[in-house]
Amino acid sequence: MSWQIKPFSRRCHVCGEAFQDGERYTSFLVNDPESGELTRFDVGEAETEAFQPEGELVCRWSRAFREEADRGPNARQQRETVESVFMSLFEGEADGEEQDVEERETLKQVLGVFLERKRVLKDRGFAQDGAFQVMEHRRSGNVYLVPTGRMTSELLPRIQEKLGELIF
């Protein structure tokens, strides 16, 4: 499965109108049944309830739209926060921290993809069994084995709020 998820579109997928500052919208991440690709749809608050994407809904999150000028320094801080959370997921394992293993693995996978898109991590291929994607942190050179398991619609709602606050 490819992880090239398109960025925020700034326009409603349903009506095509541009989002206005402060307007709420919902983003849907959907697994396309034909291609197996993840597709993102951004939908205005008025159209959210009626929107029915084709394919398996992986997750959804709601946010208020902010003009790009307001997001400058926050985008960098947000990326650094996601980077810290990603690394802490691996550090917590060594400490024997108790957490839902499935949730931890899914968070690693989603945050790893996000950080690869932001060029914080570099893809170095897959482990021999294909269960892990090898990712290298560009600045530190640390290598992380990121799970490649299939995300399910049953699991992701449990971490939906975390993703919405951390990534988007």
Image (cartoon, helix red, strand yellow):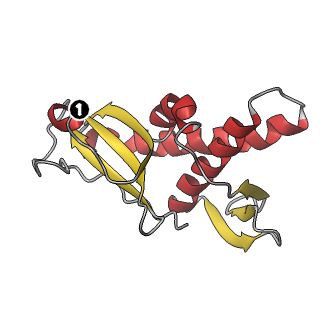
> Is 104 situated above or below 38?
above
Residue 115 is situated, as x and y percent measured from the top left of the image, at 57, 54
From the viewer's perspective, is 62 left or right of 155? left
Residue labelled with disc 1: 49
Q: Image point 59% across, 37% down: which residue?
A: 155
Please state the horizontal and vertical placement of residue 33, each as a whole percent of the image. 43, 61
Image location of residue 147, percent across then percent down: 72, 54
Q: Quadrant of the C terminus?
A: top left
Query: On the image, which quarter does residue 145 sit in?
Result: bottom right
**Amino acid residing under circle 1:** Glu
Viewer-side residue, 120 vs 126:
126
Q: Does residue 92 appear left or right of residue 109 in this picture?
A: right
Q: Is residue 133 above or below residue 45?
A: below
**Residue lying at 52% horizontally and 67% vertically, measured from the top left:** 2
At a point 20% along the width and 37% down the height, the residue shown is 50
Q: Position of residue 112 (x, y in %)?
A: 62, 53
Of residues 64 and 25, the one nearer the viewer is 25
Residue at 67%, 63% (x, y): give it. 138
